[in-house]
Image: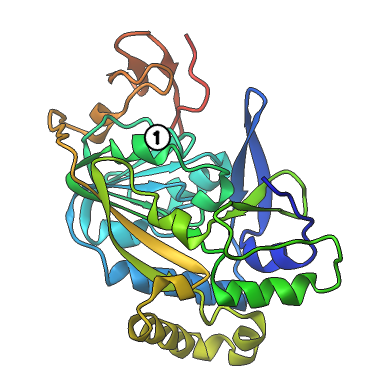
Amino acid sequence: MKRIALINVSKEIVLNKFLFVGKVGKEKIPDYESFEFTIEEEHEDLLERKLISRNLVSGQIAVDLGGGYGRMTNILLERFKYVILVDYSERNMERAVKTLDSNRVLFVLADARNPPIVDGSVDFMLSLRVMHHYPTLEFLDSLANKLRKGGTFLFNVNNVSSPIFALHMIKNFVSSKKIEINMFSARTLEVPDESGRSSIYFLNYRNILGLAPDGCKIEKMLGGGILHNGVIERRTGVLDIERLTEAELFLSRALNFARLYPDIFVFLKSEREKEFSEFSSLRDILSCTACGNPTKREGADVVCVKCGRRYYTRGGIIDMRNPLG
């Protein structure tokens, strides 16, 4: 996989104010905290909110996967009875506990690629600005297992074959002679961020079409980011962000050809015969991150019924990042 030096791209691509990196063994896990938005980020945030609200169904349980401090959790609570918020950042989760309804939200610290949730137990999963941090999305198969039959997983990815992305890259890298970019290559493009501790990955449109694991199908794809341009957004200003966002949604519907867009929202529907309904509370559908077996409650903590690993609860947050035997 080709690594290319980042000049200014990360300032517009990485939307988070603070960057930390969690570690599991030798592996680095992106661990972002995003509390403050610029005008450009306000536009993208509003676009995501409107797009999600207009495409959500309703159900019993939703998962906000890599949901940070719960930026989108309240939208899910409008349509679902319960939400499981999963993120790796403890600071994000501490903030979420203070702002979200603890009677309807379960706060879990865990790796977004391996959420500690029993297979076939949730109706909907949402994951925004998460998938582009991983070089491979092979874990989509295990994520799809968490869904009930007919359940939907909505996530977004970056489309390197978008003409808009091509123009953006040309603008930022025109002075670099060592850069070789083929927008139509089927390979994944990796862009390190300024810290050098994490990367943003871009998929070719053909890669995106092939993301659906066996037993799942891509129900639809919606484009975004066609008007996500710093110059336009700063000139528009806060008062007109609403109009700019509505214009982008209109263009997304009018030019319903996802390949054009640098940001693609993928609706992955599960057709797998999985159904888990034996639970009386949200904690009953948590699974062990080490062996995958169901867990049981012991006081405020969670313990694996098979291997005995214990996951401690602190301040209403269940830490399932580093299980203890």
Q: Quadrant of residue 185?
A: bottom right
**Mark 1: amino acid:** Pro
Disc 1, SS:
loop
Answer left or right for 279 relative to 305: left
In the rendered view, tell whether residue 316 sits above or below residue 52: above
How far across and down, in percent of the image, does residue 225 sit? 51, 74
Q: Residue at (58%, 52%) from the top-left corner?
A: 187
In the rendered view, tell whether residue 226 sits above or below residue 221: below
Specify the quadrant that holds the N terminus.
top right
- 223 or 248, which lies in front? 223
Residue bearing the label numbered 1:
115
- Residue 46 visible within the image: no
Q: Residue at (66%, 49%) from the top-left corner?
A: 199
How far across and down, in percent of the image, does residue 292 sit? 35, 21
Local crowd size for mark 1, using a 10 Å CA cut-off: few (<14), some (14–19), many (≥20): many
Q: Residue at (53%, 47%) from the top-left corner?
A: 92
How far across and down, in percent of the image, does residue 308 sit? 37, 8
Q: Quadrant of residue 173?
A: bottom right
In the rendered view, tell whether residue 325 sits above or below residue 182: above
Answer left or right for 188 relative to 255: right
Q: Quadrant of residue 175?
A: bottom right
- Residue 281 visible within the image: yes
Q: Residue at (58%, 91%) from the top-left corner?
A: 236
Q: How many marks?
A: 1
- 288 or 140, which lies in front? 140
How far across and down, in percent of the image, does residue 182 sit? 65, 63
State how the image is colored. rainbow
